[in-house]
Image (cartoon, rainbow, N blue to C red):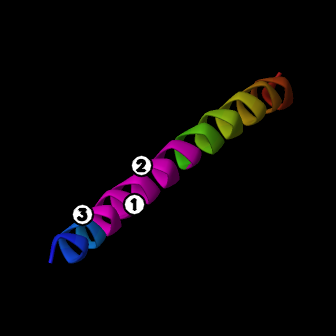
Amino acid sequence: MKLVKFFIFFNVNFFWYMIDAYIRTQTIFFILYILLMKPWLIFRNN
């Protein structure tokens, strides 16, 4: 019984860890996209 509880706890923690990692990577890619696109847009407009 203890093993089952541990397994469920581990799965929930892993699930949240994956969501957290996904949000972090999306944020990093979004920041990189802005950093790469903004200068190009400013340069193109001038």
Q: Quadrant of residue 29?
A: top right
Residue linked to disc 3: 9
Amino acid type at circle 3 is Phe
| Residue 19, position as x, y percentages in the image | 41, 57
* Quarter of the figure with the C terminus: top right
| Residue 4, position as x, y percentages in the image | 22, 77
Up-down relation of residue 1 to residue 31 (above or below): below
Q: Is residue 37 left or right of residue 43?
A: left
Helix, strand or loop for disc 2: helix
Residue linked to disc 2: 20
Give the mark, 1 or 2, whose residue is nearer the N terminus. 1
| Residue 7, position as x, y percentages in the image | 30, 71
Residue linked to disc 1: 14
Give the mark, 2 or 3, whose residue is nearer the N terminus. 3
Residue 15: say if magenta.
yes
Q: Which residues are magenta?
A: 9-25
Up-down relation of residue 36 to residue 42 (above or below): below
Q: Is residue 33 left or right of residue 23?
A: right
Q: Nearer the viewer, mark 1 or mark 3?
A: 3
Q: Residues within 10 Å of mark 2 (few under 14, many from 20)?
A: few
* Quarter of the figure with the N terminus: bottom left
Helix, strand or loop for disc 1: helix
